[in-house]
Image (cartoon, coloured by chain):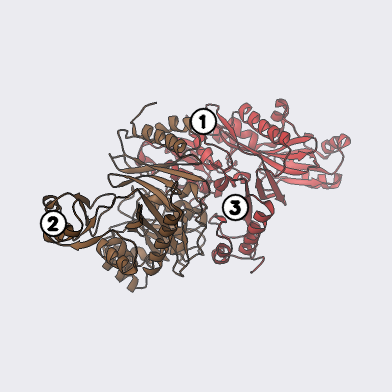
Chain colours: A brown, B red
Amino acid sequence: MTDASSSGTPGPADFPVVGVVGGGQLARMMQQPAIALGVRLRLLADSRSDSAAQVISDVVVGDYRDFETLRTFAQGCDVVTFDHEHVPTEHLRELAGAGVLVRPGPSALVFAQDKSLMRERLSELGAPLPRWSPVTSVADVLAFAEATPFPLVLKATRGGYDGKGVWVVRNEHEAAEVLSHDQVPGFIVEELVDYARELSAMVARSPSGQAVAYPVVETVQRDGICHEVYAPAPGIDEDHAVRAQQVALQIAGELDVVGMMAVELFDTPDGVLVNELAMRPHNSGHWGIDGAVTSQFENHLRAVLDLPLGDPSASAPLTVMVNLLGGDLDDLYPAYLHCMARDPALKFHMYGKVVKPGRKVGHVTATGTDLDDLLERIRHAIAYLRGDIDE
Amino acid sequence: MTDASSSGTPGPADFPVVGVVGGGQLARMMQQPAIALGVRLRLLADSRSDSAAQVISDVVVGDYRDFETLRTFAQGCDVVTFDHEHVPTEHLRELAGAGVLVRPGPSALVFAQDKSLMRERLSELGAPLPRWSPVTSVADVLAFAEATPFPLVLKATRGGYDGKGVWVVRNEHEAAEVLSHDQVPGFIVEELVDYARELSAMVARSPSGQAVAYPVVETVQRDGICHEVYAPAPGIDEDHAVRAQQVALQIAGELDVVGMMAVELFDTPDGVLVNELAMRPHNSGHWGIDGAVTSQFENHLRAVLDLPLGDPSASAPLTVMVNLLGGDLDDLYPAYLHCMARDPALKFHMYGKVVKPGRKVGHVTATGTDLDDLLERIRHAIAYLRGDIDE
């Protein structure tokens, strides 16, 4: 274990230091179970005003794209993990080569960073996928369209998130326009899946190979951004739920994932199809802070520390989480008076971010038994916090 | 609201800063709901290695007994509250006089600081109390003993906690020895109550007068230290539970308490009797982090900020919490491997403290339906963490 004096975080020296690269809300929400477990977080953030930097005492301000910054940061840590997937793969390889415990490791993380590599590897594993192909030209797209007609989906292989880097194209002209984005390093094309709903299967996996699966949840996306999550997915076909968990556990094992992994899936009448992978705590798992025995944030810490994993079971019959995306109101705090008075059982989670339109600035959760009741209550609070309604 | 730049805590300026005096585990556990609510904590701690100072970024190191330190600290805060009750009453009065929002206020807090004033005031309110009297001499004790025979309880009026400042005396000689403690500012004598068990009734109250009552819990004390808590108190007479909640709500209202208040009671065949008051989050409420919709730490923050209070209901049929008191093992972390592997559903809460024999260094909680099952599981983990057992 690291000497406390060298890490900047005082406290009993027998508890490890987990380095987290990235100061967003995922790192912020790791701090709550870190406090409970006695585990110390060390943060590499872009600025002291970052979401997580506000609530962690040991903060290094620096650029995660700079290898020297990463290397120095890692010296104070027993293990290094991530708030996002944007750290250059070559830096992670070099860190790992220098003996730093990087979890998930670069050879796993690359499949969450590069959609083409991910699709290729999952194809080899026999995971259920939409029809897809790597493309470099409009001619490639048209060749794909012969068997799988437009509309099609084009995705940037790297750098996309929250709907960024994903385009639905209806014809050759639109495909050409997307492919002309010269800052995108590569593309894949996929069939536009006609799904009944979107699901997320989250698993935690430790270096020693232990893995646990969370209940499969339904996610409701708007404009490519996760908007609402219902846990567990109401009325889901039990075979589809089990298959989704199996697929997620298989992927985690085969790719040697360490930490949390989210597998986003399309639920279709014929079964589930893998859409995206994320190797970190994920928006579709926030419900578990209030609705699972062990949250994804705690299990991520346990996993990267190679501690035995916590119980991922739901602790309530139904948990609903709705994201708070920035709206008309700059000041969120005054809305608490109305929202808390109206509903004492709502759980508010704010990220300490300056409000910008469409930006994820928080989420609200409630547990219960009735989906409509929970949705009415949470959506009201969200609308009030955004300034969409004033009563 | 305070300008973010002046408080040292970056973040959106519309969220308030709560100043917490005292860096113990109660302040530490306030940080978890503060993160969720987006509320910023500013801590006055004795040292950067204090339990709470490890997990809060905005820390002032200073002596709470020094008025100037308190005054400067308070300048960065929208409201000031407490981790302990040891701040001199006169300092609190002066702070409040200078316009600082001190919650709970000094006129309420004094009843948690001074047992004689508390007993006197509760007598006026008609709260059920053990027979008691202020005493300054052995003669006073002997006069009391005429109607209420030995053994009796002597208590220091100020400064006691966790069994410190409480003595059971069997005769005049023992009473004389206790009264000779010249560092004790004053004493009261009380009957030694023959109780079936000890209870705690916790309430949260806001400045606007809203109050909520938590389920009444059973507390098991050892050597005057809270050892185990069962929530709600198993098999309690419903009338006694309701009476305990009523008494707690009445006291909170009459004394104008703001924040959390714990009323510790004796449960006797004839009803409940008030033992102690604490005006802050309390050990008997830690269960609620994992077992209540809104924890005492969140409701304390909501109350001192005059936000509407959260739902204090239990979210599980039964929650058991056992304190981890320092034992033979200095290093707690390695025990996680065994304890977490044996029981993935246990919730560990560590305080970041150096282990000393008998010191409260953490607690373990679990929820379920069967008291014996929960006790076996948690006690095993506690014994392993202490080094009492090794398998």
Q: Position of residue B230 (x, y in %)?
A: 66, 47
Residue, x 58% and y 61% (percent of image)?
A: B343
Q: Nearer the viewer, residue B23 or B263?
A: B263
- Above or below: residue A386 compared with residue B228: above
Tell me the number on the disc at residue B365.
3
The C terminus of chain A lies in quadrant: top left
Q: Nearer the viewer, residue A227 or B296?
A: A227
Asked if the residues shown at circle 2 and circle 3 are in contact, with their CB atoms under 8 angstroms apart, the answer is no
Count up the numbered dots.
Answer: 3
Q: Position of residue B374 (x, y in %)?
A: 65, 54
Circle 1 is placed at which residue position?
B96
Other-residue count near label 2 (Cα within 10 Å), few / some / many at <14 / 14–19 / ≥20: few
Distance CA(mark 2)–CA(mark 3): 55 Å
Secondary structure at numbered mark 2? loop
Give the side of residue A170 with respect to residue B225, left or right.
Answer: left
- Above or below: residue B144 compared with residue A240: above
Other-residue count near label 1 (Cα within 10 Å), few / some / many at <14 / 14–19 / ≥20: some
Distance CA(mark 3)–CA(mark 1): 38 Å
Whichever of labels 3 and 1 marks the residue nearer the N terminus, that label is: 1
Residue, x 61% and y 27% (percent of image)?
A: B253
Does the image show residue A8? no
Tell me the number on the disc at residue A182.
2
Q: Could you tell me which chain the residue with mark 1 belongs to?
A: B
Q: Could you tell me which chain the residue with mark 3 belongs to?
A: B
